[in-house]
Image (tube, grey):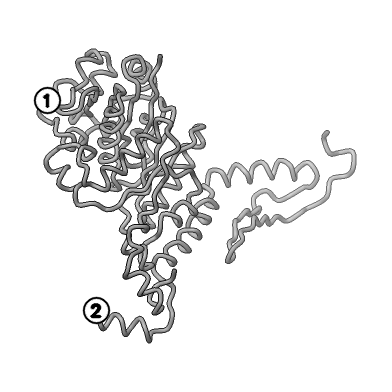
Amino acid sequence: MEGKIIVITSGKGGVGKTTATAALGAAIALEGKRVAVVDMDIGLRNLDVVMGLENRIVFNVVDLAKGRCKVRQASIKDRRIENLFLIPASQSDNKTALSTDDMVRLCKKLRQEFDVVLIDCPAGIEQGFENSVIGADEAVVVCTPEVSAVRDADRIIGLLYARSITPKLIVNRIVPRLVASGDMLSHKDVVDVLSIELIGLVCMDDFVITSTNTGTPIVLDRDSRAGQAFRRIAARLLGNTEIPIVDPLEDLKGFWNRISSKIGLRKT
Amino acid sequence: MLNNFFSKMFKEKEAPPGEVAKKRLQFALVYDKLEVSDEMLQNLQNDIVDVLSKYFEIDKASLRLDITRQEDLSALVLNTPIIAAKKRGQAPK
């Protein structure tokens, strides 16, 4: 059976693509699939540090795509999670080191070795994006509730449609308190503007910072809201569509909300 | 905190920032999609000249093609002096 390739993209940088890729890769591997996460940010690799595998790199994705090593040699096994492998970016090349033809060949190879391949797409719409998308079957667009991120996501969505890929949306770094006070775009606003299918909502979570600092998978932390949100997204990506998407504002609808909506501070 | 409370009580109702963001985004995205590259505009102009030349003698040099934008609509405006209409039968099939 051939594996499927999912590209994680966003257009804008710094919205949480790499964190999402690491978390989803770990979560999908925990579901029992053999997973590879591929860092396509050539020249600016980061997925390795986020996953805590930075000192195990021997070969990278450029070596693999150019046939200088085997898939097994370029795949770094995760320290904690069985069946999770990282194929790191090259740090010395630049984004034009690979062509779309190289990528098509690479994706074909990876499909034979893994059940799921997640591609961490670099920011931007240049060669790195083209390379990340060319072999993908599906796409996940990560977007934060900010005007700049939403606008760039819209552009990326257009480019994905042009390649006959229908992307799904993750709204990341939601701050429920600010959404409730009307200061932040709600996930509904983002979905409205982008009009694509939503696959998950992730709240701003301090655990993302600590788990990135230590290079440990956030999905293993039961107390992390973001980690648990990524686990649900992973399950949905694997076709488990019954898991409901919980509105992060639900938790807030406690005492204070009822009071403040009564006295007119908050629109209900 | 208290200050905030009073200002919210007495200030005129402004649209909350989240709502402003959504409106601005919707406009920005519409405008982004209307953006046409110079190359495309030039190709369009060449094609239009070809079509018009079948029926009219036009001054090709002074033809102008522009996209104008008003509040919520954009229009393609073509200005060309017509020197003469071609006689019927002269137009190619």
Quarter holding the C terminus of chain A is bottom left
Q: Chain of mark 1?
A: A
Residue at 25 percent across and 35 percent down: it is A22
* Left or right: A118, with A162 as reference point: left
Q: Of helix, strand and loop, which one carries label 1?
A: helix
Residue at 28 percent across and 25 percent down: it is A36
Residue A248 locus on image (x, y percent)? 35, 54
Disc 1 crowd rating (10 Å Cα; few below 14, some 14-19, many 20+) is few
Please, which residue is most extreme toward the right here?
B88
* Left or right: A266, with B28 as reference point: left
Residue A77 locus on image (x, y percent)? 18, 23
* Numbered disc total: 2
Locate residue A103: give its quadrant: top left
Mark 1: amino acid: Arg
Q: Which residue is mark 1?
A: A56
Residue at 45 percent across and 57 percent down: it is A189
Q: Which residue is mark 2?
A: B1
Against A174, residue A7 (above or below) is: above
Residue A87 visible (yes or no): no
- Give the camera-side residue of A133 and B54: A133
Residue A6 visible (yes or no): yes
Locate residue B13: give its quadrant: bottom left
- Give the camera-side residue of A254 and A157: A254
Q: Chain of mark 2?
A: B
Residue A120 locus on image (x, y percent)? 30, 34
Mark 2: amino acid: Met
Against A82, residue B44 (above or below) is: below
- Give the camera-side residue of A214 and A89: A214
Residue A126 locus on image (x, y percent)? 37, 37
Disc 2 and disc 1: Cα gap in Å? 51 Å
